[in-house]
Amino acid sequence: MSERLTFDTVPDLIETEEQLEELVSRPTQGLVDDFATLDGDIIVLGVAGKVGPSLARMAKRAAPEKRVIGVARFSEAGSKEELEGFGIETIRCDLLDQEAVAQLPKVKNVVYMAGKKFGTNDDPSFAWAMNTMVPATVASHFRDSRIVAFSTLCVYPFGVVAHNGWDERVQPRPVGDYANSCVGRERAFEYGSHVHGTPGRLARLNYAIDLRYGVLHDIASWVHRGEPIPIRTGHASVIWQGDSNAQILRCLKHCTVPTSPINIGGPEQASVRAIAHAFGEKFGKAPIFEGEEEPTGWANSTYQAQRLFGYPNVPLARMIDWVAHWVEKGGAIYGKPTRYEVRDGLF
């Protein structure tokens, strides 16, 4: 039996990408237990992004007897073969092609990860097509499946950080084309769920942390380079990507009819200023701040997820240690800032 993701099994530091990939795809015992009673195989749509490969690999590790199928265009060389090396079946498909989607196998469990964020302002029509038209096509084709769809905290209006942000009862009030199109994605899946009785969940993800990107990597890089840290967005909810992967996959056992949102993120609204000072101590550099904290931001409550799944296994302090070591040693990066500090919705 492979090792489970628990507080007691995570290392003090992560040295290599191979070690990172193993850890970020390591299943929790809760996921293994849920998958043991989950009927059907799993298909992951949009598997080739930053998060998809680790999520698909985690699903396969949690239930080796299930088929796990990854669907994407696979435009990056080697990504298809890497997934296949972990026992994941792959299908090359442009999800904007409705005829191609119609040929996908109708498995019982669907994780929908496809979408467009960065560059939305350069071509908003493409972002709207990816974030609304594709979900409508998927909702129709997989009407007899369970569908857990990735969404974002950006669908919420800004909330008062001191009040712990919004829970799932708050109606979306998005800012900018990206967030509006994400509400469109949710509405497409909601419509399909209402019409066809499709069970589902809309996973409103906060900021998932991988050592090669993420809010903590952004802050650590600014401190390490001696660059000013924009501080108006003074707090962020962060969660280890392995924990968020496990919670989102476990949502397949906690679907509702009609589909409903669930916030996935850390248990706390972490202070950007405090995180920067923690990195400053690691690097021996005083952080430089630009501006002053605003009382509001994209903040939401993860109490519902905590009730279902418990606390994340990797605490904030451990993530800070990992990211600081990774940045200082010059570990591999994706070069894709989160833009968490953006407050006008323009991505």
Image (cartoon, helix red, strand yellow):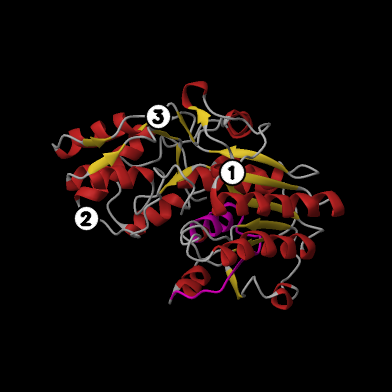
- Packing grade of label 3 (10 A; few <14, some 14-19, many >=20) is few
* 134 in relation to 188, above or below: below
Q: Which residue is mark 1?
A: 174
Disc 2 from disc 1: Cα separation:
37 Å
Label 2 to label 3, Cα distance in Å?
A: 32 Å
Q: Residue at x 41, y 56 (%)?
A: 21
Residue 4 appears in view = no
Image coords of residue 129 (percent x, y): 63, 65
Magenta region includes residue 110: no
Q: Is residue 149 shown above or below 303?
A: below
Query: Residue 19 versus residue 344: which sits nearer the camera?
Result: 344
Q: Which residue has dot 2 on it?
A: 330
Question: Pointers 2 and 1 in contact (CB under 8 A)?
Answer: no
Residue at image mark 3: 294
Is residue 59 highlighted in magenta?
yes
Secondary element at image label 3: loop
**As shown in the figure, which amino acid type bears the numbered disc 1?**
Pro
